Image (cartoon, rainbow, N blue to C red):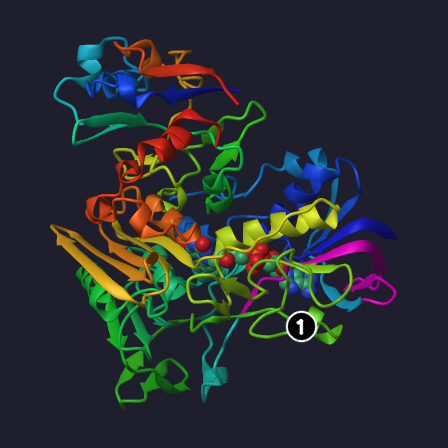
Amino acid sequence: MKRVYVNEKWCLGCRLCEYNCAFANSGEKDMVKALKGKKIYPRIRVDEHDGITFAVSCRHCEDPICVKSCIAGALSKEGDGMVKLDRTKCVGCLTCVLVCPYGAVVQDERGAALKCELCLTNTAGYPACVKGCPNAAIVYEERD
Amino acid sequence: MISKYVIIGGGVASTGCIEGIRKVDPSGGITLITAEPYLTYCRPLISYLLEGKTTLEKMLYRPESFYEKNGVRVMLATKSERIDPERKTVMLSDGTSIGYEKLLCATGSVPFVPPFEGLDTVKSKFSFLTLDDALELERAITPESRVFIVGAGLIGLKCAEGIHGRVGSITVCDLAPQVLASILDSDSANIVEETLQSHGINLILGDTVAKFEENVAILQSGASVEFDVLVLAVGVRPNVALVRDAGGKIGRGIIVDDTMLTSLPDVYAAGDCTESFDITSSSSRVLAILPNAYMQGECAGINMAEGYSSYANAVPMNSVGFFGLHIATAGTYTGELHEIRTLGCLKKLYVNEGRLVGFIIIGDTTRAGIYTSLIRNKTPLDEIDFELIKNYPSLMAFSGNSRLKMLGGVV
Ligand SMILES: Cc1cc2nc3c(=O)[nH]c(=O)nc-3n(C[C@H](O)[C@H](O)[C@H](O)COP(=O)(O)OP(=O)(O)OC[C@H]3O[C@@H](n4cnc5c(N)ncnc54)[C@H](O)[C@@H]3O)c2cc1C
């Protein structure tokens, strides 16, 4: 399956991916209206230390421990390989946060879980973090 | 009747088993026998149901279509009475029996009820383990009810949160001098106790019931509590009866090997009814948590279908919240303690022989999985920059090469 991969050598730490992610998942048509003056809850997060920067989002693991640990049956791995969260089933226990080895499950404004679904479940249709990365440090492709 | 695979008990371990079997064997017949009248639901959500945060439909663990899709014959409200490991049959409560090639015992837990004097004089009393328990409790409570919960463990406190706002008062007592004694130390429990009390929940700690006289509990200290509704949440025990009576080995729970096979041929066991080897304390313990039930069930299923899987890195862990306060714990609390207190957050990390073996986090649990994974993988801390992530977990602590594997490859 195609996944989002990051190359930290090329990451500028500009955090545009975070903004593009929050916008793509906001359901709004206008970026300013979607983000201005609001706390954002991006599903990809940039880490920065000592000159190193990189972004992390869900790895869509082959054998996802979050899915097996979800006490609400809200996480599933679909036939296409994507790890998907049914937010209407999630009760916000954060067991997924407790088990994800990559720290890739974040929290939404209600404190419930939130994760990357490759922009396949919103209207963007193609990962917005990838599309908007000015240095091609984030790519969307098939690897093995 | 005969079925290639027979599963006794329709909890989450059974779903793990079905999914495990189907990874290897796409068509062998599966029969699921379960005492409860419901398809597998999310047991931990029964308190959320009372709280109005989920519904009966949403708390189904898998969609209704799951069973047909996977060729599973489901027998609801049917109890297995006996396993005959020689004839390879299971006797059922409806008088019939069913033959198996491979059997999974996933019978879960049973509530532990201490022999309190006078308990039989209490009219309105409940356990809090099943959906029916929750629905019956819901019918019994009124906005005036004084509810008395015996046991301040996870189940007792979740029950309290579930009915909060729907009853007159809630009092919780526990013999331990703190709440959540099996997962927190007294320091961290204190924070949780303050949160509970600030929401009007009365806590009586270090004291328990000596006897009941109808709707009054006389405590060991001599104090008394008047109540209308009693919830007994003292603890649970592995439900080992079927395997024990069939001659299988039992320790704290049903004893299984790394493939989930019991001491009886072709009889596997998974979930709350078993004991697991906890890699953080190097001891056999009952890990009555949902992730463990799923992973054991899946492992058993793969092996029952003659694939190969081993589950040998069980770690106790819990993520639970009360009134918005989050708690994340894992492992054992031994070794050198690294404690970090920041505004609204208490974090205790335990390091033993150069490895992270446990933690308690109260408050902000962001990315706690990075710590959990260090425990599960027994990562030597000198291979990472541990100092850097004591405050805030990040993949930054790993070498560029390890990170390349994690973020640049299929994992
Ligand atoms: C209120 C509450 C909150 C919880 N919260 C959490 C949490 O936040 N996180 C977490 O990880 N865990 C939590 N747990 C624990 C979690 O629910 C269990 O670890 C998990 O459900 C175990 O699954 P299981 O399949 O082993 O057993 P169970 O879910 O107990 O299922 C066993 C099934 O077997 C059936 N059965 C038993 N004997 C027979 C028989 N002879 N014949 C036929 N059927 C039989 C039973 O009726 C039952 O349906 C909670 C539990 C409760 C009660």
A17 above or below A49? Answer: above
Amino acid type, callout 1:
Ala
Is the shortest distance between ligand 1 and the CB of mark 1 under 8 Å?
yes
A23 inside magenta stretch:
no
Q: Is residue A86 visible?
A: yes
Of the pair B134 and B102, the residue shown nearer to us: B102
**Chain letter for mark 1:** B
B106 above or below A28? Answer: below
Q: Is residue B135 visible?
A: no
Q: Position of residue B12 (x, y in %)?
A: 57, 50
Residue that numbered label 1 is attached to: B241
Q: Position of residue B160 (x, y in %)?
A: 34, 61
* Residue at 78% over, 37% down: B27
B106 above or below A61? Answer: below
B218 above or below B337? Answer: below
Q: Is residue B7 left or right of residue B85?
A: left
B89 inside magenta stretch:
yes
Q: Quadrant of ligand 1?
A: bottom right
* Residue at 59% over, 65% down: B273
